[in-house]
Image (cartoon, helix red, strand yellow):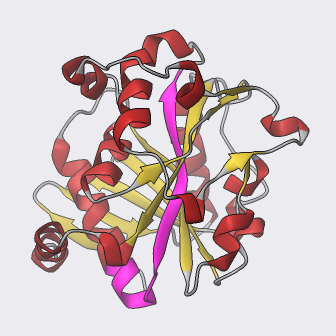
Amino acid sequence: MMVPLCKGRYRVRPATGPGDIRAVQHLRGLCFRGGHGPDADAFDPLCRHMLIEEAPGGTLVGCFRLLAIPGGEIGTSYSAQFYELSALRRFKGPMAELGRFCIRPDRTDPDILRLAWAALTRFVDHERIGMLFGCSSFRGTETEAYADTFAMLRERHLAPKRWWPRVKAQAKAQEVYRFARRLSGQRPDPARALRSMPPLLRSYLAMGGWVSDHAVVDRDLGTLHVFTGLEIAAVPPARARLLRADAVGAV
């Protein structure tokens, strides 16, 4: 059950019709395609779409979509186009894919991301989601710009072996950057690594999330992305309490 939440000057709510879908596709086009038309794909009709708006005024400042995945059916996800995820078919319990998360480039207020996670926490609890996953995107396709970030991911945040996402052979995932192999032995500069890490990925990792050992170069969207997973049961208790406090505090 997705209901509107308000906190401070923002609210997050589910899309209620075609006009909302067009609005989020336009914002995604601005964030992922440089404003050259809307961003839409075949997964949009399957997903629940959430809008983050300024209140009052209703200016759209962020959005994301959610796809509920029954246990063992991860092959139907958007991410499965790019990663070989057969290990995750063994995961017991409901899963959800978080996708197309974006915030207007001119907005940097951390409350936007905080409110998004409040809504996600309510969704996860209500739907009894056992794992949240998706593709965490880096702006641009130049891997060298994120050398410290990838080195940190390799050193601290690779997926558990039992869930290991592998390189997919099909055409959509042929262009990959195997950072765990390429950066073997390279020590990251933590400050630079965190500065260039997408905020959503930082949030995932702070909760105990993990990533694939390679990034996919997505020329269509002009991004790099890593598969990212978060087992809800593994979220540290103190972090879980903070998330639920935000979810309860938003009205």
Q: Which residue is drawn at 60% across and 56% down?
A: 164
Work out whether residue 68 can be spotted.
yes
Q: Where residue 240 appears, x then y in whole percent?
A: 19, 73
Task: Please tell me which residue is depicted at 43% across the width and 18% down the height of the picture.
Answer: 146
Q: Where is residue 247 in the image (x, y as percent from the top left)?
A: 19, 75
User: In the displayed structure, does residue 147 sit left or right of residue 179?
Assistant: left
Front residue (pair 164, 196): 164
Q: Nearer the viewer, residue 244 or 91?
A: 91
**177 or 5, which is in the foreground?**
177
Please check the rendered image and state whether residue 123 is part of the magenta-colored stretch, yes or no.
yes
Going 23% across and 33% down the picture, which residue do you hit?
Answer: 108
Q: In which quarter of the image is the C terminus?
A: bottom left
Please provide percent x and percent y for residue 119. 31, 70
Whether 217 is drawn above or below 156: the answer is: above
Quadrant of the rendered structure where residue 177 is? top right
**Is residue 57 visible to the viewer in this orientation of the structure?**
no
Q: Is residue 183 above or below residue 132?
A: above
Which image quadrant: the N terminus?
Answer: bottom left
Q: Which residues make up the magenta segment?
A: 122-139
Relative side of 127 to 219, left or right:
left
Q: In this view, does 73 lie to the left or right of 106?
A: right
**Left or right placement of residue 218 versus residue 248 in this view:** right
Q: Tag count in the figure? A: 0
Q: Within the image, what quadrant is residue 239 found in?
A: bottom left
